[in-house]
Amino acid sequence: ASLGILVSGTGTNMYSIAKKCLSGELPAVVSVVISSRENAPALEKARSLGIPSYVVRKKDFQSQTEYEDKMIAILKAHNVDLVVLAGFLNILSPYFIDAFRWKIINVHPSLIPAFCGPGYYGMKVHEAVIQYGVKITGVTVHFVDESVDGGPIILQRPVEVDDDDTPETLAEKVKQVEHEVLPEAIKLIVENELRIVGRKVLIRREDD
Ligand code: GRF
């Protein structure tokens, strides 16, 4: 399967996926990386792995549709089967989602529906988790639909919050788990192990 990964920041999730593809652990290839920012460290990581990478900035286009058309064209040109949002900070409109219906997934650094939705991105999620005093946070991988962070959930995994955790130490613990859970979700999709029934994602079990 051909993966297209959209990034905005450090790209550690993209890097983890690419390494698992290269090792054969993940039966897929990262065909293209698109960054919404020109100086994202993710771009350097992609280039170090020889992955075609592009910068597509929203402000360079007259409208959201033209911006999304540019990304759609690049993804189609690379025959992408699955779009992975990994730290991608822009909101995608129904126009883009329609172009890849049920073919877009996102990793969010909390247990949705907690600490998600508008305003909950990046470090803000971990700051809110620490502030609230929850004992368990975690990672969610979900399909992207028109809602923000509300698409059907594919996988979740818990991460314990320690009393001495800071947003930074917590973000690092959560990312370590993301680097395992996101590739696992991709593998389930690529190997066609998922069924979407209503808003639930059912995973075919070994003994099914
Ligand atoms: C991850 O924590 C992800 O959950 C959030 O943004 C971060 C991206 O990190 N959406 P990276 O760019 O993959 O290192």
Image (spheres, rainbow, N blue to C red):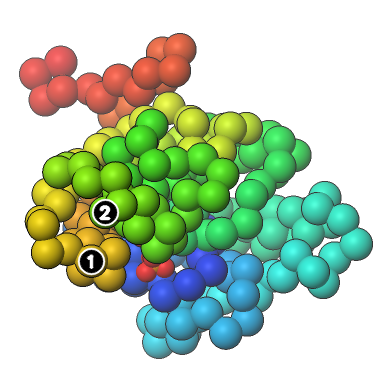
- Decide if residue 43 is in sight here: yes
Q: Mark 1 sits on what residue?
A: 166
Residue sitting at 36 percent across and 51 percent down?
128
Residue sitting at 56 percent across and 59 percent down?
89
Q: Position of residue 118 (x, y in %)?
A: 56, 44
Q: Quadrant of ligand 1?
A: bottom left
Mark 2–mark 1 CB contact (< 8 Å): yes
Is residue 100 toward the left or the right of residue 199 in the image? right
Check residue 26 in the rendering and tell me which mark sits there, or answer none.
none
Is residue 159 toward the left or the right of residue 101 in the image? left
Toward the viewer: 177 or 47? Answer: 177
Q: Amino acid at mark 2?
A: Ile
Q: Position of residue 154 (x, y in %)?
A: 33, 33
Q: Mark 2 sits on what residue?
A: 130
- Count of numbered labels shown in the rendering: 2
Toward the viewer: 9 or 85? Answer: 9
Q: How far is the residue under mark 2 from the one under mark 1?
A: 7 Å
Q: Amino acid at mark 1?
A: Thr
Toward the viewer: 126 or 151? Answer: 126
Classify mark 1: helix, strand or loop: loop
Up-down: is 126 above or below 38?
A: above
- Specify whether tag 1 is near ligand 1 (CB below 8 Å): no
